[in-house]
Image: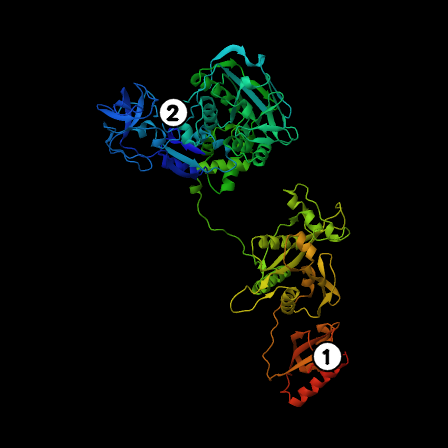
Amino acid sequence: MRVSYDWLMDYIDPDMSPEDLAKRLTLAGVEVGAVERFGSSLPEVVVGQVKAITPHPGKSNLTLVDTDIGGKVLKIVCGAKNMRVGDKVPVAKPGSELPGGRRIEEAVIYGTSSSGMLCSAQELGLELGPEDEILILDQSAKTGDLIEQVLGFNDQILCLELTPNRPDCLSMIGVAHEIAALNGKKVTMPRLSPDEIDQALNQVFKIRVEDPDLCPRYTARAVQGVEIGKSPLWMQLRLLKSGIRPINNVVDITNYVMWELGQPLHAFDMDLLKSNEILVRRAGRDELMVTLDGIERKLNPEVLVITDGKDPVALAGVMGGENTEIKDYTRAVLIEAASFNPTNIRRTARRYNLPSEASQRFEKGVNPEAVNWSQDRAALLISELAGGKVLRGTIDQNAEPYRKTVIRINPDKINRVLGLVIPVNEVIDILTRLDFMLEQKDNNDLEVTVPLRRADVTMEEDIIEEVVRLYGYEKIPITLPRGELLGNMQTTDEKLQSLIRDILTAGGYYECINYSFINPANLARLRLPEDDPRMRAIPVQNPFSEEQAVMRTTLLPGLLKVVQHNCSHRELNQLLFEIGAVFEAERLPLNQMPSEKMKLALAATGLLPEPNWLTPTREADFFTIKGILEELFDRLQINNIRFVPGQLPFGHPARGALIDAEGIELGFLVQIHPEVAEAWEIDQPVTICEIDLSLLTEKANLVPRIVPLPRYPAAKRDLAVVVSREIPAEQLEKTIREAGRTLVSEVKLFDLYEGKQIPEGKRSMAYSITFRTEEKTLTDAEVNQALNKIEKALFDQGAVLRK
């Protein structure tokens, strides 16, 4: 909200500088983000009066203008044709500098000397009129005066940064009331009573409102015999100071009154309405309308429209229609002032991407009292500035009379809440300056009647806030907070999740955080069967969109969506994980609360490590995630983990496993099926994993394990055997450990080979075996004896030594 300091003086004298006023308002809770000068400083540009206009002797399209600048007449060559003898115009004297750095000097133009320049509005930095027309000033301007004073360039603009609860300050009058509360002065209202002719509007026109929930009040006034033209310069300047582009006198008046009183208005060309009726209704499905910006809009029943009894002529509270726009030939004007449902206006403005000053005010709520004020004010200004005649009366469809809020409060409570001692008479003075009506009640209570413009004051706490912000937040003494410090101990689940994050991020994985709501179509893209529990997704009653229509039953859709998004932006190498809740229902519709479980999901795709000149890369696969999981389980001290081959609906038939811990299924690890990857628009292999953290919590030991350094040296032996492909590696490792008994401290598979020299259906597996005991140094004989037992145990399983 831009507030002109000079314009504000029409309603109240702040009795302080603009800078001091900005500080006072900010301290009172109405933040002023900046104080800006309206125009450039132009010390050598003055008011001149045209005394004579003669043709240029050397150029037919130029004229020589004798211009009086106050005791001195300058001869100036000019190409504009819109000025007349006697007009007051801006004159840039020789040596002056215009906005943008343009410097004016005496010059000879086609053989004729020119002492300065007559200026257009554009050349002075004003967005008024065409650049080839000289700005014509009001006759009240005094010859020789500085143009920056005449046009108010030295006016200071207060840029308010209002919170959503203060729509009352979205008007000059609202800000004036705020200043009155600060300095105790009275607000002067603008003139509101137009002269009317005998003909009554309700005899020739009628209003109908079909949906009072969306339009609780609709009023109309009419002015006939108007002449469309430019607004007076003073009005155009005030609109520019407010950030509004002047258009014509009638449209400018509706914008001016909105800025002055806070009530948005709209003017219809009355002769272009197809009937003598305004009907306010919901739009029909796929009904079409062309708005003022020339764009055809397809409407729906959620949109409120103003119609001429048949066709839409405006999107209610948002934008008018092209078919009833005020044009140069307009002679009769119907003025609309209404109250609309804020939520509906906000949705309509967002739906059609049509934010405006009007919709902003309707969204936040307008002062009901301002409806009639604005009608009368606009009719008065149109009759004075556009030469119209105002029809008698206002048609007012007021479906529900407005009642002022009444709040009862005790001054003692105000002091108790604030921790201050504010005298009762000062509390009464503050509330009186706010225009709140007070009545003394029993027990020293005050019954406070809130003015309609302050819709944000609805409870005792609001009254307390009003008192303290005007009393002065800065007067509240500074005190240190007191209270008992409580230990913030992490729960076991929180400790587990924190440890998992540390391990995975140390392993190069990046954490994702997705919404708990997903698109139900994403579950179908995982090829889950209809009877799968994960298909029982709980619907959200009022979702923002279809993308967040149900509560997730698995973390996979969110994680795959992240993978797809990254791949589409050419980030192909990804190690991701997410820790989040899923929601499982016994049945739908719900008849009991769903269970909420924390799960861990991982995804790996692309090349690892990132391609570089030093380290060779490999494709992320099943074993990439299996490796980090084994490290995770080892740190959590969860033993006897098995990866049991298994198939999942969304998994590759030969590259998946269920994660088993002593007969309990913790989760799964699988490469997604190529068809599923295609459905997610991912064109490279992706391996995913999901683990139930509640099961992990039961088995994990979060106490760090400390192992002393070995006292005796180790002996290492390598053993390569050829075995059937059907024998899993974990079975061979188990055999080696059992055969070597307590002497085997570590077994690592360091080579896997299938190919030449290896029979079909077989594979070579090479193990590094570490022998060590905590009792003594092992001899070669003891190590070899243990190795022979291991070889024999492997031979019993069909293994042969690889030569």
Residue annotated with mark 2: 234
Q: What residue type is labelled 2?
A: Trp
Residue 452 got which mark?
A: none
Where the N terminus falls, by quadrant?
top left
Residue 145 seen in this snapshot: no
Relative side of 522 to 101, left or right: right
Query: Which tag, 1 or 2, sits closer to the chain's start?
Result: 2
Q: What element carries label 2?
A: helix
Q: How crowded is mark 2: few (under 14 residues within 10 Å), some or many (20 or more)?
A: some
Q: Which residue is drawn at 47% across and 21% down?
A: 250
Q: Which percent across, then down, holds residue 173? A: 45, 28
Camera-side residue: 164 or 484? 164
Q: Is mark 1 on a helix, strand or loop?
A: helix
Q: Which percent across, then down, holds residue 564? A: 61, 53
Q: Which percent across, then down, holds residue 737? A: 70, 78
Q: What residue type is labelled 1?
A: Glu
Relative side of 338 to 767, left or right: left
Residue annotated with mark 1: 738
Q: Which percent across, then down, holds residue 409? A: 54, 34
Which image quadrant is residue 321 in? top right
Q: Residues within 10 Å of mark 1 (few under 14, many from 20)?
A: some
Camera-side residue: 664 or 26? 664
From this view, report whether residue 148 is shown above or below residue 558. Answer: above
